Image (cartoon, grey):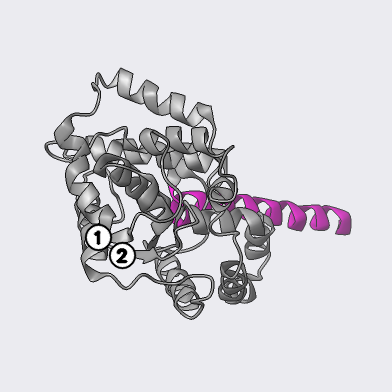
Amino acid sequence: MKILNSIAVHRSRIMASATVLVLSASAIGCGTSGVNMYAKSDDVKLGQQMAQKIAADPAHYPILNNPTLTSYVQSIENRIVTSPNVQNKDFHYTVTIINDPKTINAFTIPGGGIYVYTGLLNFINDESALAGVLAHETTHADHRHGTRNMTQQMGLQTVAALALGAAGSQYAQLGTVAANLGTELTVLRFSRDDEREADQGSFDDLRQLPGQPWWPGGASLFLTKSLASQPSQPGAFQQLFLTHPVDQQRIDALNTDLKNAHIAGATTAQLNAANYARYKAMLGGTGATAPH
């Protein structure tokens, strides 16, 4: 009888674990994009913590003090966020420019903070490419890739612990784990699946904007130049290729999206290269440049 009771208890615990796992995937997580044990408010809090650390570290993140250029880039981001494809419109999608002309990169922190390096702004030549990059970074925040990756790092043992009665202590540890992971690249380093999802989100964000002010394939303009330029400028692309794996498959996938949606090449108005050049001139033309 004791053995039977022990089996029954063990069986009930397994069923409880399975129940919590289902609830985590459906109620706490976000459906098709995978389990996320963090609430949206945790994305915001973690993003605030990371933003404070970035602001307090000018040696690694020198912020560009150019309100005109920052306002210009922010205006493009503000319009992207109005796309019907953006789900979490209550996040704070704020653009900050990092004054590092030798680095071609951009990254997003949870909750919507987007950081763009002057090296990237100098590297691209038109607004569609910039809009493609911004929409890509917007998707990382919108789809909550940072906290989703943190959930994967923690593993499903957390879910099992919740089912076995450690709910209080386990959730109390989430803030500590978030703080520790937030100091590293864990939240910012994305898989190829994440990158493809962000590319798709970039395409859909721009495609669904009324009037399509920018070419929906803008991200492919940046990726194509990056892949071609990386061998001759490896240092400039080091952070980009570390946190955002770039390969021909991503470019091919975007080109397939364009073909399937029957979208022709970018128009002169969508590229708006002349207007972009006026703002780009504020950078002084230093740092890495796009191939001609």
Query: Within 10 angstroms of label 2, few (less than 14), some, or many (20 or more) residues?
Result: some
Q: Position of residue 230 (x, y in %)?
A: 55, 39
Q: Please state, as top left, top right, bottom left or bottom right, where the C terminus lies in the image.
A: top left
**Residue that extends furthest to the bottom in the rendered view of this protein:** 56
Q: Which mark is residue 94?
A: 2
Horizontally, is 191 left or right of 88 in the view?
right
Amino acid under disc 1:
Gln
Q: Main secondary structure of the magenta part?
A: helix
Q: Say which element carries label 2.
A: loop
Q: Position of residue 198 (x, y in %)?
A: 42, 42
Q: Please state, as top left, top right, bottom left or bottom right, where the N terminus lies in the image.
A: bottom right
Above or below, comparing residue 7 to residue 175 in the picture? above
Residue stretch rendered in magenta on the structure: 1-30
Q: Say which element carries label 1.
A: helix
Q: Cα distance, mark 2 to mark 1?
A: 7 Å
- Sequence-wise first label, 2 or 1: 1
The quadrant in which residue 258 appears is top left
Q: Which mark is residue 74?
A: 1
